[in-house]
Image (tube, helix red, strand yellow):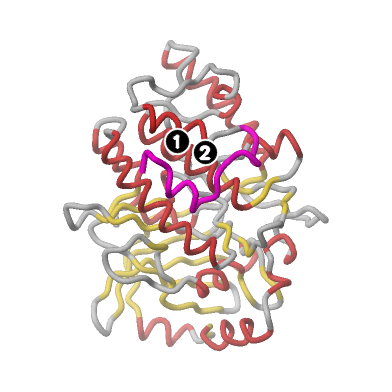
Amino acid sequence: MDKDSAKKTMNCGSPALKRDQDLNTSTSDQSSASGNPNRTIRTRNDSCIDLPRHSTSDDRTSSDECGLTEVTEKVREDVEASTLEDSAEFEAKYQQQDLLGKGGCGSVFAGYRKADNLPVAIKHVPNDKILCKHVRISAEVTIMSKLAAKSEGTSAPVSLLDCYKLDQELILVLERPIPAKDLFDHIKTNGGPLDEEEAKVILKQLIDAAIDPEDKHVFHRDIKLENILIETSSDIPRVRLLDFGLSCLAKKTSTYKVFFGTHIPPEYHDRGFYRAGPTTVFQMGVVLFETLHSDTFVPNRFFRNKQRISNELSENCQDFFRTSLNRDPDQRPTLKQLRSHPWL
């Protein structure tokens, strides 16, 4: 995994309002720099912004917002039983190496498991940066514990291997596939947007990787180019979903009033709340847009027809965009319906 790929395991979200202000500023600067007011320049979305210091009834850090109040006592006991509290045991089992990335939410290091030299990513999160927890359980740990590893060759979230809860920090030991790069860098290496057929292969796998968490009531909340890892060890790339630091446990009917993440669904502004399923589908559309176009997707420009789907794409592909990026969340398909779209 390269430097920027590993950063994705520590990416921290910001409140939606704060991100909107940042996006408006950066978009204006980028357009001016490019000399074209109708074009934005894609930049990496990997900045980390500190969380609010004081909780409110709508704060993302509440247990209810994360869905942890629904976690059963057995789940809590199972997670706590697998969470170790001895730093000496961590040091005996793993060798930590170079720093791969650092941000407001913590640091990620390369490393390997001493018993078999398995490459790992070691994520250190200070206790005051844990986004959500219920009693002693971090939402990220609870959620990743629910997502069992899939067989080799299938799309899947990156697996949590070990967890250590120490006095001052939480240490997560994660898979580190090699060779691999995130989708942002994969597009950059390609020299620009991917061709439609390659994008189709990636989207199929990405949707498959997202369906399993959804079936287990896990809402990732921050699907974007930087959180999609592409394993490149074979002719057919394998897609892995990264960074569950902003995720939560969600019921089908759960609604949310505070958004932490990158690609904000339009209903957050239109209605003041959003739901898991339609938001995930919307983010799939954004990922595809940024895979097949040279511009960063900007919702307010897209919905004012100032940013358009390329007419060089097939009609089925254009329809995939219109379906997944529908402004009305009630008109978007489910992930499983999207997986059966004619384009795929």
Quadrant where the image shows the C terminus? top left
Q: Secondary structure at mark 2?
A: helix
Q: Is residue 328 above or below residue 100?
A: above
Residue at the extreme left: 235
Amino acid at circle 1: Phe
Q: Which mark is residue 320?
A: 1
**According to the image, label 2 marks what residue?**
324
Tell me if 267 is positioned left or right of 122 in this view. Answer: right
Q: Are marks 2 and 1 in contact (CB under 8 Å)?
A: yes
Q: Position of residue 20 (x, y in %)?
A: 64, 33
Q: Which mark is residue 113?
A: none
Question: Which residue occupies 55% across, 18% down?
Answer: 305
Number of residues whose C-alpha sits closer than 10 Å to that of mark 2, classed few (under 14), some (14–19) or many (20 or more): many
Magenta span contains residue 337: yes
Q: Nearer the viewer, residue 59 or 313?
A: 313
> Which residues lie in the magenta part?
327-344
Question: Which residue occupies 44% across, 53% down?
Answer: 8
